[in-house]
Image (tube, helix red, strand yellow):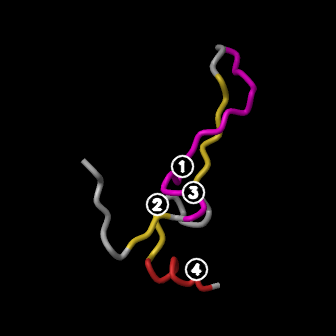
Amino acid sequence: MPETRPADTRLCRDCDGFPTVAITTGQTSSDGTRQTLTVTCRTCYGTGTVPRRAAAREVSA
């Protein structure tokens, strides 16, 4: 079943709705687990959406 969104929000064009990601640094800790960094999108501040007005401004610019 498709997920519905309110009509006044749009997906962030920079993160495409995936606002938080874990990036592997390639290093391992002493117990053997990989070290990761959690990074959030700077455009939408980790929400995955932008207001409709902001989305319209980006398209017209």
Give the alpha-carbon distance from disc 2 to disc 1, as whole Å.
9 Å
Q: Nearer the viewer, mark 1 or mark 4?
A: 4
Q: Position of residue 49 (x, y in %)?
A: 46, 65
Determine whether 58 is above or below 33 in the image: below
Q: CA distance from mark 3 to mark 1?
A: 9 Å
- Residue 2 % position (x, y): 28, 52
Label 3: few (<14), some (14–19) or many (≥20) C-alpha neighbours in 10 Å: some
Find residue 20 and name its label.
Answer: 1
Residue 37 part of the magenta segment: no
Residue 20 horizontal side relative to residue 32, left or right: left
- Residue under label 3, please give it: 15
The label shown at residue 59 is: 4
Q: Nearer the viewer, residue 14 or 32?
A: 14
Q: Name the residue at the left extreme.
A: 1
**In this rendering, would 29 be left or right of 50?**
right
Q: Secondary structure at mark 4?
A: helix
Circle 3 — which element? Answer: loop
